[in-house]
Image (spheres, grey):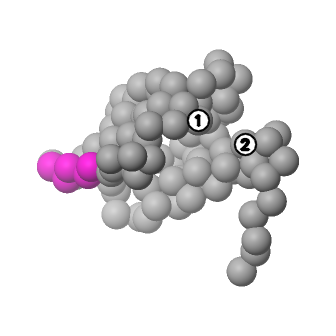
Amino acid sequence: MGGQTATTALVKFGTLRIVVTKKEFLLKFVRDRKRWLYRLYEAKKRYKLTVLNYIVTSNHIHLLVQDKGKNEIASSMQLIVGRTAQEYNQRKNVRVPSG
């Protein structure tokens, strides 16, 4: 796949399973994995996200959450991915053009 991101989603019985795989080790350090988990906890509190199970490794995440039809999954993913990317970019001094 050479640097591309593969995403798989399976919807069954009101549950969404998301597997995101990337060859880069963006969560290589324990602090990055802990920050990702903190963002998941933050999304759980803010959007009432029901987390059934998860696993965070150095290069991918498995997340099993329940969809209640209140847009909580999309809102949570925006929060988690957005904040994680901001922190990573700040630490690495990456400038991302806006709009």
Q: Is residue 36 left or right of residue 16?
A: right
The residue that disc 1 covers is: 26
The residue that disc 2 covers is: 88
Asked if disc 1 and disc 2 are in contact, CB closer than 8 Å, the reply is: yes
Q: Position of residue 13 (x, y in %)?
A: 15, 48
| Residue depicted at 56% across the width and 59% down the height | 78
Q: Is residue 41 left or right of residue 31?
A: left
Which residue is more in the foreground, 55 or 3?
A: 3
Q: Is residue 23 above or below residue 53?
A: below
Q: Is residue 61 left or right of residue 13?
A: right
**Which segment is the magenta one?**
8-12
| Residue depicted at 58% across the width and 35% down the height | 26
Q: Is residue 57 left or right of residue 30?
A: left
Describe the element under mark 2 as helix, strand or loop.
helix
Residue most extreme to the front: 2
What crowding class fits label 1: few (fewer than 14 Cα within 10 Å), some (14-19), or many (20 or more)? some
Let me know if residue 97 is in the magenta part: no
